[in-house]
Amino acid sequence: MKLNLNLQPIDTWLKKTSEPLLIAGPCSAETEDQLIATAHLIAKTGKASVLRAGIWKPRTRPGEFEGIGSIGLQWLKRAKEETGLPTAVEVATAKHVEEALAAGVDILWVGARSTVNPFTVQEIADALKGVDIPVLVKNPVNPDLQLWIGALERINNAGITKLGAIHRGFSSFEKTAFRNEPMWEIAIQLKTLCPELPIINDPSHICGNRELIPYISQKALDMDMQGLMIESHMDPSVAWTDAKQQLTPSALAELMDHLTLRKPEIRDKDFTDKLASLRENIDKIDDQIIQKIAERMQIVQKIGEYKRDNGVTILQVNRWDQIMNKRSAFASALKLDLNFTGKFLELIHSESIRKQTEIMNDKPVVEEK
């Protein structure tokens, strides 16, 4: 089912300075000199289309720097006047919206901590009614596609048609190399439900450290995302917030120069014919895979009935270990990623358990003598 949003194309409300689209600026506006100097350095690169800065910062614990507050809006206004760059800030309350609009901010975004709360999003949406301004909505902190969609719908229902999403990754209990797990599949699902919705990637918050930003940035462009939001500070070593994930403007320019842009489509008959042929082969193989899984589940049903009739438990841990070890070794020999293979086998095993549980709860059919 497609997501029905009333949207204007991004190129009608956000002009690109260069390819790809880049929204850049410090995590936090700290002082007027810091913001203005950083803005000039970013503008000088010619890479950024929008200057971003955190004015109000939702922090995990009290006592941490929670943003410079409303005075920072005046600094942003000056930065815009001196550099010509449109400005963007995060808003989390109706008061934030009103103050940002009064200061002439060009783009608003709803942060991940706000997206997770429908009451907060609705408050922001109500404050936006009757306003013609672009709004970007970050994914919620937790991996919940419906919350993300709900936030977009609330903002869109308020009359905002210049609307986009920001993919900034998701919080995960398991610690990995990333500050927030990309979970690309969730962004892909959103794009599938609403192909016309622009999605901008936020490598800074996904990575949590500057070393990984080039990798995630390239991956985002390869996933056909419409642009990047990257934090940049004139001297990240002294940044008041998120110092490790910010780039200097010169490092930012170098990053952008080394990114490879690829097209989602190409008008070349030979290429299209070859791609169509390869996709046809994929379709045939997918059909075979589905058929084989169906055949496997038919056998699972027989096993379930046999276990039920003989009073045997559904799960035998030793058998599951054998399957994982044997199939993983086979998959490795075929050059398949072990992480993918493990998830695939676990999914099939979970469905097998579900199916056998249903059978166990059914009474066996007793034939009359």
Image (spheres, rainbow, N blue to C red):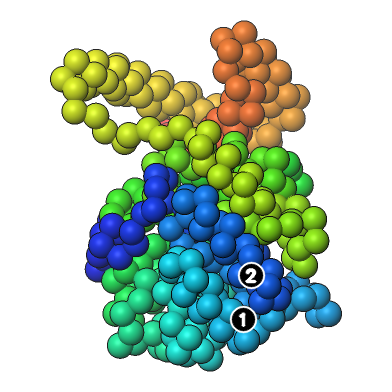
Counting the numbered discs, the total is 2
Query: Mark 2 — residue?
Result: 35
Q: Secondary structure at mark 1?
A: helix
User: The N terminus lies in which quarter of the figure?
Assistant: bottom left
**Amino acid marked by disc 2:** Leu
Depth check: 357 or 2 in front?
Answer: 2
**Amino acid marked by disc 1:** Gly
Depth check: 144 or 124 in front?
Answer: 124
- Image coordinates of residue 349 in percent, x first then y, are 58, 33
Position above or below: 246 against 211: below
Residue beneath the point at 65% across and 36% down: 314
Residue beneath the point at 62% across and 86% down: 71
Position above or below: 369 against 246: above
Residue beneath the point at 63% across and 13% down: 332
Question: Disc 1 versus disc 2: distance between alpha carbons?
Answer: 9 Å
Depth check: 149 or 342 in front?
Answer: 149
Question: Tag 2: Cα neighbours inside 10 Å, few (<14), some, or many (≥20)?
Answer: many
Q: Which mark is residue 85?
A: none
Q: Is residue 159 left or right of residue 311?
A: left
Query: Residue 170's image quarter?
Result: bottom right
In this view, the residue farthest toward the right is 63
| Residues marked 1 and 2 touching at CB (< 8 Å) | yes
- Image coordinates of residue 286 in percent, x first then y, are 35, 24
- Image coordinates of residue 43 in percent, x first then y, are 51, 58
Residue 356 in view, yes or no: no
User: The C terminus lies in which quarter of the figure?
Assistant: top left
Q: Secondary structure at mark 2?
A: helix
Query: Residue 92's image quarter?
Result: bottom right
Residue beneath the point at 63% across and 56% down: 232
- Image coordinates of residue 324 in percent, x first then y, are 67, 23
Query: Mark 1 — residue?
Result: 72
Q: Earlier in the sequence, mark 1 or mark 2?
A: 2
